[in-house]
Amino acid sequence: MPQVTVFVPAPLRACSGGAAELRLEAPTVRAVLEDLERRHPGLYRSVCDETGAVRRHVNLFVNELHMRERDGLDTALVPGDKLTILPAVSGG
Amino acid sequence: MAERVILSIGTKKGLFVAEGAKSRRSFSLRGPFGTGVSVYSTLLDTRGAPRIYASSCNAFFGMKVLRSTDLGKTFKETKSCPAFPKEDGRALMNIWALEPGNGKKDLWCGVEPASLFRSEDGGDSWQLVDGISNHEHARKWHPGNGGLCLHTILPDGDRVHLGISTGGHYMSEDCGKTFAPANNGVGAGFLPDPYPEFGQCVHKIAGHKDAPGRLYMQNHGGWAEWDGPGGRRPDIGVLRSDDHGKTWRSIAKGLPSDFGFPIVVHPHDPDTVYVMPHEGMTRACPGGAPAAWRSEDGGDSWRKLAKGLPKKDSYFTVQRDGMDIDDLKTPALYFGTTTGQLWMGRDGGEEWTCLFDSLPPIHCVKVGVA
């Protein structure tokens, strides 16, 4: 399985033991989230609600592209890919 | 250590804790905790070693429950937060109420979408309460302007009273196992049926331990000029029950408006009750002149309490949990505003002082002596 890197934003690092990056093996974005649910449940709950949906104001990028511009949760990953978790911009 | 007056203040940008001596001459402020995240409910739990709880409702990353065991000097997240079972299909959107249960570590938690959770270990684990969360009416309730929230939890021995907007008043008589609507006399201005079985927009319910069966309700009033189906519905906004909520009657006569959000009972006198009348359209005190109103005869008559408050040009809202009263011998009333002021009214609101004037918008205020 491809080894990929997950970037954890600063507000969520309390849920990843302080790590800014997590390395894991997963073939899709969905599989990354399933891995996070097992190994970092607090981080998973911050990214997904209890129905399993990615929270409305959280964006997931595969390298430079938002996952919705690829195949969403079914986006296939290749070795070296970087999945970046970012809060959506907010203002006003 | 001498007892201190503790104010737990939930705001749009986190939780603040104010602490002062029992003289209440001045308060020092700590916080914000849960920085930048809205706090819609807080609880000062003085059963045993004092604890302060607060919901932290992060629009990005979801809900947390914060807990302090050192009177609000530090806060940590509890081990878990209320969550619906995955197969339920609902997702937690907000936490509106935290209240003590019967057991020493029991807590109740009311959430949006309107549901109830229970903890038996001080908030480290939570169970969905099916009797109300999966009640046959639950999928028929509709969200009000604040969302579909279960915002009031009022334990009374084996009884538990709930306020749901918009669901109405529900009551359990078996410690929260089963619930039934109890809205006889509770009006709804926004439905064709002026007195439906359920679906009212209850704003807050309060009771008193020395008056079993007595309840006060701030309902969604402001329908005196309504000309739609069913006609005018004056005075449905402030209500009283003397039979544990089975039937309700208006006590709004004498108030400048029957619309408002909080309702608070004096800690030593169940006949003394406070409201903060707002105009329905502005969600602010009538004429931009803030005042709390007090009844000392269970709602038969009302008196305006405005000494020290601005006389004009003040258009803040006091939200449903934005007012509380301490339980000292001569209690002070407190309210927080959506414009970030925290006011204290000595002698039960006789004379008002602004304790803090530039906090973030205030959602909730709870006071305790610990």
Image (cartoon, coloured by chain):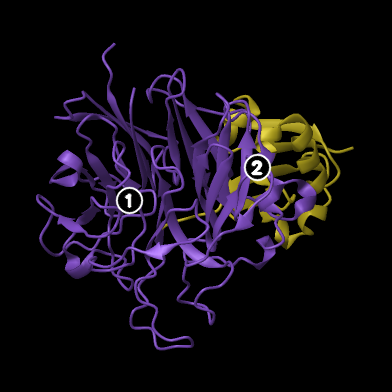
Quarter placement of the N terminus of chain B? top left
Say which residue appears at 56% left-offset and 67% top-offset.
B199
Identify the amino acid type marked 2.
Answer: Asp
Residue under disc 2 on the same chain as residue under disc 1: yes
With B230 as the anchor, is A63 left or right in this view?
right
Q: Position of residue B68 (x, y in %)?
A: 45, 25
Q: Secondary structure at mark 2?
A: loop
> Chain B is which colour?
purple
Q: Are marks 2 and 1 in contact (CB under 8 Å)?
A: no
Q: Chain of mark 2?
A: B
Residue B151's place in the image compared with B210, above or below, is below
Closer to the camera: disc 2 or disc 1?
2
> Chain A is which colour?
yellow
Q: Position of residue A22 (x, y in %)?
A: 70, 31
With B174 as the anchor, is B47 left or right in this view?
left
Mark 2 Cα-neighbour bin, 10 Å: few <14, some 14–19, many ≥20: few
List the residue tagged with mark 2.
Answer: B174
Identify the amino acid type marked 1.
Answer: Pro
Say which residue appears at 31% left-offset and 37% top-offset.
B267
Residue B361's disc is 1
Residue B209's disc is none
Q: Chain of mark 1?
A: B
Q: Position of residue B203 (x, y in %)?
A: 43, 58
Residue B53's place in the image compared with B185, above or below, is above
User: Is B222 or A15 nearer to us in this picture?
Assistant: B222
Q: CA distance from mark 2 to mark 1?
A: 38 Å
Q: Position of residue B97 (x, y in %)?
A: 50, 45
Q: Does residue B60 appear in this view?
A: no
Q: Secondary structure at mark 1?
A: loop
User: Is A73 or B13 nearer to us in this picture?
Assistant: B13
Q: Does residue B215 appear in this view?
A: yes
